[in-house]
Amino acid sequence: MLTAWRRALLDLIYPPKCPVCRAEVTEHGAWCQPCLAAVGGARLINVAEHRLKYLDACYAVCDYTAGVQKIIRHLKFRQAERYARHLAWLVARSGAAEYGRGCQAVVPVPLDAERRKERGYNQTELIFREWAAAQGLVWLDVLARCRPTAPQWRLTLAERRQNIKGAFYVTRPEVVAGKNLLLVDDIFTTGVTMDECARMLKAAGARRVLGLAVASGAV
């Protein structure tokens, strides 16, 4: 663990900067005010409008703007783990804690084994795990993929539904039975992936499944 003086020295050598414009900010992970204003506010997503059958509700922390897109792409495709803290900072300052009140555990949407091997991590876990612990929520990594799937962003809505159907299973049904769960992911576009995950969690006995995404919008 870093001592206070070592942290101060590191801050002096490597001052915290906004992840988008690189302006100096007050703490590591923070955004400058203009870039923060550009990402939009947190909001509830209309799951009925998206024709989602199993996800009870969904909350997005911000819009999928150019700045957020840059950070998520660096995190996903350039092994730049440090960018996760900037998204975690947004989550911590949103209304996500109040939205998730009444949930007992957090479940991340899983990567398939090949993508996880390529990246070395699940970016959703990097973003949300510490936040979950701060809320007193149990982290349940109980969803797994039983087959690889094509990247969703390349597909039509109908193709996305077919692509993801039956792609997940719950590894420990007994730990989700009877619980209200917060299902977390980095991006919400059509909601098809989250809805399929919610279907499997409810089939395993979960009472309610609420979605929580960092960003919402077209990819």
Image (cartoon, rainbow, N blue to C red):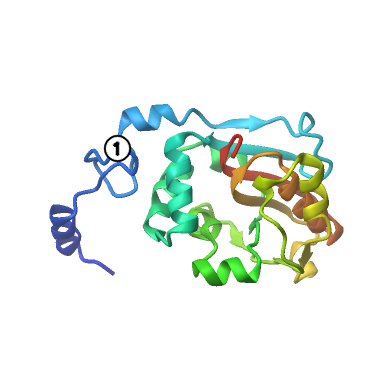
Q: Is residue 102 visible?
A: no
Circle 1 residue: 21
Q: Residue at x 76, y 71 (%)?
A: 172
Give the residue at the far right of this rendering: 203
Which quadrant, please, contains the C terminus?
A: top right
Looking at the image, is 87 positioned above or below residue 108? above
The correct choice, above or below, for 118 with respect to 101 in the image is: below
Q: Amino acid at mark 1?
A: Cys
What residue is shown at x 72% (from left), y 30% (from top)? 46
Instruction: Identify which residue, 1 or 46, lies in the foreground.
Output: 46
**Count of residue discs:** 1
Question: Quick check: 53 left or right of 210?
Answer: right
Q: How far across and how far down the image is residue 44, in percent? A: 64, 31
The residue closer to the viewer here, 55 or 151, is: 151
Q: Is residue 43 left or right of residue 147?
A: left
Q: Is residue 121 above or below residue 100?
A: below
Describe the element under mark 1 as helix, strand or loop. loop
- For the view shown, which residue lies furthest in the front direction? 154
Q: Is residue 137 visible?
A: yes
Task: Using the image as rendered, state which of residue 128 and residue 52 is in the foreground.
Answer: 52
Crowd around label 1: few <14 · some 14–19 · many ≥20 (10 Å): few
Image location (x, y in percent) of residue 182: 66, 50
Place of residue 54 in the rendered image (x, y in percent of width and height, measured from the top left): 82, 45
Residue 152 picture location, percent across and down:
68, 49
Give the image quarter of residue 92. Answer: top left
Q: Taking 30 as reference, is 118 left or right?
A: right
Quadrant showing the N terminus: bottom left
| Residue at x-position 72% and y-position 45% | 155
In-image side of 7 versus 154 (left or right): left
